Amino acid sequence: MTINQTFIKELEERLNNDGPFSSHQLFSLGFQAEQARIIPSFSGLRSLDFLPHMSFLDHQVETALETIEKMNGRAILADEVGLGKTIEAGLILKEYMLRGLVKNALILVPASLVNQWVNELNTKFYIPAVHHRKHHNWEGNTILVSSLDTAKRTPHQEVILANEYDLVLIDEAHKLKNDQTKNYQFVRQIKKKYCLLLTATPIQNDLMEIFNLISILKPGHLGDVTSFKEKYSSKTEKQEADVYLKQLIERVMIRNTRENTNLKPSNRIIETVLVDFSNEESEVYEQLNNMQRGQDIFTKITLLREICSSREACYLSLAKLQETNPQDAEIYSIIQKINALPAHSKAMKAVELIEQIGDEKVIIFTEYRATQLYLQWILQQHGISSVPFRGGFNRSKKDWMLQLFKVQAQVLIATEAGAEGINLQFCHHLINYDLPWNPMKIEQRIGRIHRFGQDNDVKVYNLAVKQTIEEHILHVLYEKIKLFENVIGELDAILSNLNIADVEEEIETIYRESDSLGEAEIKLENLASIVQKIADETSEKSVGE
Amino acid sequence: MAIVDIEQFIIDYFSAYQCNPLKMEDGVMQVELTEELDKILMNRPFYWHYIQSLGQEGVPMTLTLITNPDKREQAGEWIDIGSPRLQQIFNHVTQHEKYTLLFQEVNTDKNTPLYPWLLANFKVSYRGRQKKEEIISLGIQLVTGKVIVNMMDELNKLALKQQISNFCYTISPIITLTSGFKRIEKIIQHYVENQPKEWANEALETRNEEIALLKQFYKDDLENNIVKKEMEEINNRYTPEITIDVTSGGLIYLLQDFPDIERFS
């Protein structure tokens, strides 16, 4: 506890040299400024005083407090999509900066989100974060945002590992679940004081994943590798050990769900909209369904799904089939019929829906690029303005499209890829033009609009064509499993108990291994029943607690 | 303690730096900077370098600062306690307005002695798992050795100027600046040593817990580089530390009766 002597020496020197000295007014302003910035208490969030323009939700403030005071700045922030993980992380970073505990930080996020992070930290938190690209320097007292992919590349990796960071933040941290990957080993080696890992899906399949994440934060918290594996790899013991394990995990991980944040700013209203095929369309559908070349049931399924989406999507696949089988009369005849089809019934339904919605913004998700183009055309024919959005766009085109959607166009037509991480709270109508087979995708889609900052009830319209594979999938996946109501984490756990890593793959396998559509449908029903049963048991248990 | 009146603070700041004219209307303030403040606040060294090399007069910029929430959408900079501009001003005044030499203003026609006081404003930081700071303002009279706390508050009640008033003269210190400073240093150290220590003990406990976990995790491989790295990180994060800085201070000549409690009773 020594006191720096520079003050008294400097004062003496200035007295000898007749100054320079501050006037009473300026001297007193300096003292006031010092007082205004003081941290008067070990506990509490001083940052709230310095961010009067922000209104935080209770769970966000609590998360920041808990991370700092109980977890000592090393935590997994695992809120469900849309509850404001970025906000929580920003608040924590701000608090540490105000307390002088963080001077430099390294923020590693997916490339598509770098700009968004830089903007949010600057405008919402007054944190002077910079994008690394504009700043070819990993050192110094700066808050750097970069993509993990850039950071781990030579020569960046070497410089980063030689440096020390007061805080390291990894967004989409589920990418670090596997301790054998380069990503993991790189992050593990970074020298850091505080560390925040952000992910909406902390456990997907295997408990080793959470073990690995926690080992970045607090090695040894869950014991050593060998004994952890012994304890939790056999399933019977797992059940009993669960409570203890859960408590341990809760000491380093915070997961807010829509359920446990009392505040439910908006509801989800899910509406199924069934569409009738026209006679011509039904004919084509039946013809595809009875195709001679149907030994490969998976190809057939794909074609059937596509014709339910748009004739363009189906046409592209058929044209490819024709290339490999130029003599096939059946394919030729179907292609002819498809060419003659009038406007797609489902597309017309979508137009009708949008017209009913009126002037409000709508986002449409489709699985197919061909459908995306077709929808753009047909909306334009009906005087509805729209912009496309897909993974292949570069970053600035994406930003531009989102801007157009925000200020001009009524509709955004998006394909899955590239929608990760975009925020569209200003829109509250979502049309699932076709339904993906992976429930995670659905949650990600809805999460774009049903998130922190959404003031309206979110309306989701699921379109499906009657008496087709679509209706069946809708029935099994989305009505029986109650995909929309089940908390995604729960479904996750259920599926991993059944050793199902990926629902989409599972369904595909079922179709591939079935000899007929009928058989596949029965197997799907069975799967749905099992999942439903486990879900019911789980919810009974939690009611019992 | 926070600055109660940000608006007053920035008005004081700009007027102390001779910025004119100050147009102040309903929480919207227009201020034409001086060259000095433009260089400090506007971050455009190339402009000033260029102007200088041409041998011309530069034109300082005009700032529009908004403190009224109803006017927030207007063109200009929004100012609140956290906004970058105010923080920049805070940085400027805390870094540059640290030393002072002042004399009490006295209206008199008799010879009047002024007594020397050393003022030092300390900032004490306690860093364990979390951090806390406090500011302590001490003054010591360099003739009698009398010490008072909250010296800044007392001074704010007085009129002080940079020149000595007519008919006033200063008494030479008997205690040197260095030994005066040593005396108040001792007082601060004594005070800090007698503060509660829970925060430090908690930090040490957490440190030991985490080190134990770490050792258990790596068992036989404690010489591993990554273990050393983790160990260092834990030490950096939890080892308790107290630092004492002097943020500002100076030499002040005051009437013999300071601090004059009577006047306010």
Image (spheres, coloured by chain):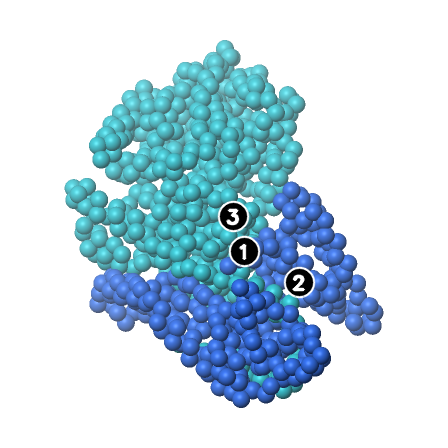
Q: Nearer the viewer, mark 2 or mark 3?
A: 2
**Is the C terminus of chain A in the top left, top right, bottom left or bottom right quadrant?**
top left
Residue occupied by mark 2: B13
- B6 sits left or right of A218 in the view: right
Q: Which of the marked residues, 3 or 1, is nearer the chain's N terminus?
A: 3
| Chain letter belonging to callout 2 | B
Is residue A6 shown above or below B29? below
Give the residue drawn at x 38%, y 76%: B190
Give the residue drawn at x 38%, y 38%: A261
Q: Amino acid at mark 2?
A: Tyr
Crowd tier of the residue under label 2, counting other residues whose Cα lies within 10 Å: few below 14, some 14–19, many 20 or above: some
| Image location of residue A485, percent across then percent down | 36, 29
Give the residue drawn at x 66%, y 74%: B105
Are labels 1 and 2 assigned to the same chain?
Answer: no
Crowd tier of the residue under label 3, counting other residues whose Cα lies within 10 Å: few below 14, some 14–19, many 20 or above: some
Q: Secondary structure at mark 1?
A: loop
Nearer to me, A281 or B227: B227
Which mark is on residue A127?
1
Q: Secondary structure at mark 3?
A: helix
Crowd tier of the residue under label 1, counting other residues whose Cα lies within 10 Å: few below 14, some 14–19, many 20 or above: many
| Image location of residue A134, percent across then percent down | 59, 59
Residue occupied by mark 3: A113
Q: CA distance from mark 1 to mark 2?
A: 24 Å
Chain A image colour: cyan
- A19 sits left or right of A463 in the view: right
Colour blue maps to chain: B
